[in-house]
Amino acid sequence: MAKLSRHADTVIINANIYQKKGMDSIAVTDGMISFVGNYDEVKGKITQTTKVIDIDGRAILPGFIDLNNHVFEEAYAVEGSCPLPSTDDYSELAGVLEKCAAAIPESTWVIGFSRLLPRMNKPSFMPKQWLDKFIPERPVVLIDLSSDMVWVNSRALETAQLNRYSINPPGGRIIKTADKASLTGVLLGSAGEKVISRARAAHPDLCHINYPNVVHGLKNVTRNGITTLGDARSYWHRGWNRVWETILANGDLSARVTVRPWLYPHLSMKEQLDYFSGIARQDLTSRLIINQVKVNLDGSYTAGTARLSEPYLSPTLVSETNGVFYISPSELTAWLERLDKIGFGVNINATGDEAVKASLNAIQDVRLQDIDQVFSIHSQGVISREDVPRFASLNVSADFQIGNITDSTVLSERSRKNRTLEDTLMPALSVAGANVTLSSGWATSQFSPLKGIAKSLSMGSQGFSDIQMAIAAYTINPARALGLEGITGSIDVGKSADFVILDQDITELKPEQIPQVNVSLTMLEGEIVYQSESDKRGA
């Protein structure tokens, strides 16, 4: 609680304030929380210009924070020019693609965006031959939302100058038939980027195309009570950073966004460091922050590119039986050192236990050099028991997308025997003192933080037993992972006035009831960025 030195711009009254038992009012001045306490103490600071919001006993929480959100990819017009249905029926997909091809100019690439390519792909499957059957004359590229896998036809391979003699680029794999006589049409990691770059060259004004779609995606963000998000990755070679800058300049940035430019394994360190230095935005009070990069150390279980300490149980797409390192562990250490010199932290995608260990080893190396940067590891599906306490000791955040965890295991079937920590990663890391966060990975999994909180409480030994831990994983914990704990993540005087107002108190509900709770209002820096229709009618 604090005394107001002058009148408040906004006062929220009759509030059920999260973690502030007995208090019912919040004052906002210049976008900051200037008072938390009781109405009798704040009413004297209400003037004719003060906006008073009576929320009639509803719950008010810190604005949710989605640490790894793919809002750009979900809204990306070019890659989504041929939206694919959520089906693994090849004939249904073929029909959709044929209709797309018929509806766009013949000189244009056919570009599909899917969530199911890894699940549909089998080691013996030949996407190139399948695509060639119904779209033989035009380049086709189907992009998985993870961007770790793309499918292409023969014309796309020809356009990108890839053939049976092509070698794997750093950070990527060109999948060939067992006899190496031809390409299957599957490209992993940076190998797919070469084709995507060719496809995007046909769309010169990407900023104009993508702008309205990303703004629309941000509306979905605020509708779900999210006030801050970590952009999962920004493909700066595709001009994505320019879109974010334009959205900010035009006043359309309705959430605080930490943009993480993508680290390309096949580009030089100097080129990328120069670029990162040029776009850095270190002001943590801004709505647009650029002070971290995204690194993919390994890939996914479905592609066999997650790096494990033991071999996969069945054949995978790649020749390496334990999965791959897209960037070598020694290169990762060098990157952490150099990025620190320009003030950048790192969010590492490390899925397999060997990749997690390598990430922690690299971070340990730079911690010994007194580098005190913000580091987080995302997508870990399996961790060696010995590495669990290292997250806390090295001050590394652990992020989970629980929408991608099945009820029975955190891993795919083929790697089940490789699991070294039985289905208890989230609680084990929490007990060990790690900063554990939950994120959506939208649109690879469910988007709503309320659904995420509910699921985390319904997972038995895999999830949380305490709703306070679940809420922290969407508020103060991701704020720490972004280096923003002094700015947002809790309702305290001096922090940004970032709030989500719910029509029910989720701390009093059973987990299965939480997804039915509605977001009434979302506020960022004291500004209403979302208001439900029922609230608008009652205003």
Image (cartoon, rainbow, N blue to C red):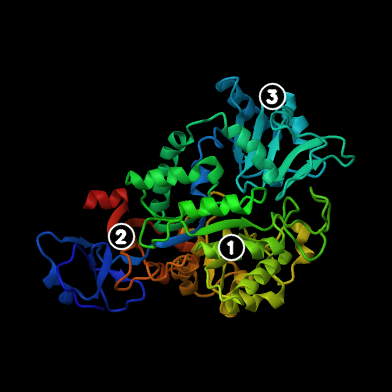
Q: Which residue is mark 1?
A: 338
| Secondary structure state at the residue bearing disc 3 | loop
Mark nearest the camera among 1 and 3 is 1
Sequence-first disc among 1 and 2: 1
- The Cα atoms of the two marked residues, 1 and 2, are separated by 33 Å
Closer-to-camera residue (371/6) = 371
Amino acid at circle 1: Arg
Res 379 visible = no
Residue 350 versus residue 88 in the image, above or below:
below
Q: Hey, which quadrant is residue 246 in on the image?
A: top left
Residue 336 in the image: state x and y as whole percent: 60, 64
Q: Which residue is mark 3?
A: 135
- The Cα atoms of the two marked residues, 3 and 2, are separated by 50 Å
| Residue 525, label in figure | 2
The structure residue drawn at horizontal position 79% and vertical position 38%, both measured from the top left corner, is: 166
Closer-to-camera residue (529/512) = 529
| Residue 166, label in figure | none
Amino acid at circle 2: Glu
Mark nearest the camera among 3 and 2 is 2
Q: Is residue 149 left or right of residue 34?
A: right
Res 271 visible = yes
Q: Is residue 467 left or right of residue 32?
A: right
Q: Residues within 10 Å of mark 3 (few under 14, many from 20)?
A: some
CB within 8 Å, label 1 to label 3: no
Amino acid at circle 3: Ile
The structure residue drawn at horizontal position 32% and vertical position 51%, both measured from the top left corner, is: 532
Q: Residues within 10 Å of mark 1 (few under 14, many from 20)?
A: some
CB within 8 Å, label 1 to label 2: no
